[in-house]
Image (cartoon, helix red, strand yellow):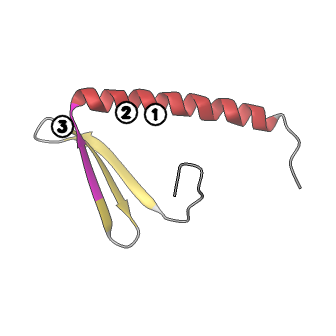
């Protein structure tokens, strides 16, 4: 599965600081999957920058797609 592969999996995400001074991204998905991902603050800032860049790129793609006729 890759970035562009559709999925029907439902998941919840939580983001926050830990007592150890790390930033945790906690993902809980169907089937009892729990995935705690800990990052130091610098790594977390890099991830935030990547999320912003991806959001900007997705927004630009949505704008381009909105101008095209729908495929049938």
| Circle 2 residue | 47
Q: Residue furthest left?
A: 20
The boundaries of the magenta stretch are 35-40
Q: Is residue 17 left or right of residue 61?
A: left
Q: In screen coordinates, is 61 left or right of 52?
A: right
Instruction: Give the crowd class for mark 1: few <14, some 14-19, many >=20 residues within 10 Å.
Output: few
- In the rendered image, residue 15, in percent from the top left (x then y), is placed at 31, 43
Q: Are marks 1 and 3 in contact (CB under 8 Å)?
A: no
Return the residue nearer the eye: 5 or 47: 5
Q: How many marks?
A: 3
> Which residue in the structure is indicated by mark 1?
51
- Measure the alpha-carbon separation of dots 2 and 3: 13 Å
Q: Which residue is mark 3?
A: 22
Contact between labelled residues 2 and 1, with CB atoms less than 8 Å apart: yes
Q: Secondary structure at mark 1?
A: helix
Residue 17 position, x and y percent, is 21, 39
The residue lying at 85 percent from left, 38 percent from top is 68
Residue 20 is situated, as x and y percent measured from the top left of the image, at: 10, 39
Labels 2, 3: front one? 2
Above/below status of 71 relative to 66: below
Let me know if residue 64 is in the magenta part.
no
């Amino acid at each position: 599965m890759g970035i562009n592969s559709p999925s029907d999996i439902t998941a919840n995400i939580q983001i926050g600081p830990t007592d150890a001074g790390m930033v945790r991204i906690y993902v809980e998905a169907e089937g009892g999957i729990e995935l705690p991902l800990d990052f130091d603050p610098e790594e977390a800032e890099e991830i935030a920058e990547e999320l912003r860049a991806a959001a900007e790129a997705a927004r630009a793609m949505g704008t381009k797609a909105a101008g095209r006729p729908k495929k049938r």
